[in-house]
Amino acid sequence: MAIANGGQIDHTTAKNRVVYSSFNLWSGFLFGIGLVAFIDEAVFHQLLHWHHFYDKSTTDIGLVSDGLFHAFSWFATVASLFMYANLRRRKGLWPKRWLGGAFLGAGAFQLYDGLIHHKLMKLHQIRYDVDILIYDLIWNITAVILIAIGVFLLLRTRKTSKKIKAER
């Protein structure tokens, strides 16, 4: 038995977690991107009607851009879940590392959206005809918090990975 994160796991699982460490990270990262993109699309685009993905043209073009954005979010989510199933099949799933990747992906996507889409490219804003500062602060601060949680979890698994390698 190997010890990981205070709990005991068998050597095969411990070895496979180390072998598939980056695969866990990327699967979670992709899931985080897909999840936040889905939430953004469903809540802000469809339910609240605050904006479309591309607001620099007609409403029809905005709706088409939302459809493409929605397809992207589902492609990322489904691809990540295939990777997740593959990790489970190989007994290499490392839930903490996968979750760290998911937080990192969610935060990275949200920060990218807030800085690049909203401010640099000006594809859309969170809202229009209101003081946007508070919305931008909430959006981007939440992104940084998600990234910090992801990095924390990934660093914790990195320490565990070193312990497992040392035990072998």
Image (tube, rainbow, N blue to C red):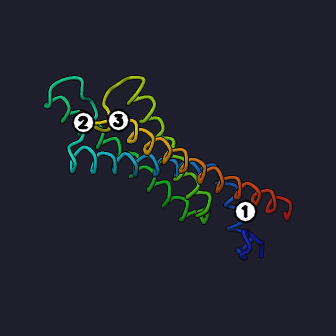
Which structural element holds mark 2?
Answer: loop
Quarter of the image containing the N terminus? bottom right
Sequence-first tag of 3 and 2: 2
Question: In front: mark 2 or mark 1?
Answer: 2
Judge left or right: residue 4 versus residue 84. Answer: right
Tell me which residue sits at (55%, 50%) in the image: 145
- Name the residue type under label 3: Ile
Tell me which residue sits at (28%, 36%) in the image: 130
Quarter of the image containing the C terminus? bottom right
Q: Which sits in the foreground, 94 or 111?
A: 111
Q: Contact, CB < 8 Å: mark 1 with mark 3?
A: no
Judge left or right: residue 44 versus residue 103. Answer: left
Q: Quadrant of residue 65?
A: top left
Mark 3 crowd level (few <14, some 14–19, many ≥20, 10 Å Cα): few
Say which residue label 2 marks: 52
Say which residue label 1 marks: 15
Q: Which sits in the foreground, 120 or 128?
A: 128
Could you say where residue 60 lies in the image, as x and y percent from the top left?
13, 31
CA distance for labels 3 and 2? 16 Å
Tell me which residue sits at (35%, 25%) in the image: 122
- Name the residue type under label 1: Lys
Mark 2 crowd level (few <14, some 14–19, many ≥20, 10 Å Cα): many
Could you say where residue 2 lies in the image, as x and y percent from the top left?
77, 72
Could you say where residue 69 lies in the image, as x and y percent from the top left?
30, 38
Which structural element holds mark 3?
Answer: loop
Tell me which residue sits at (80%, 56%) in the image: 162
Question: In front: mark 3 or mark 2?
Answer: 3
Say which residue label 3 marks: 132
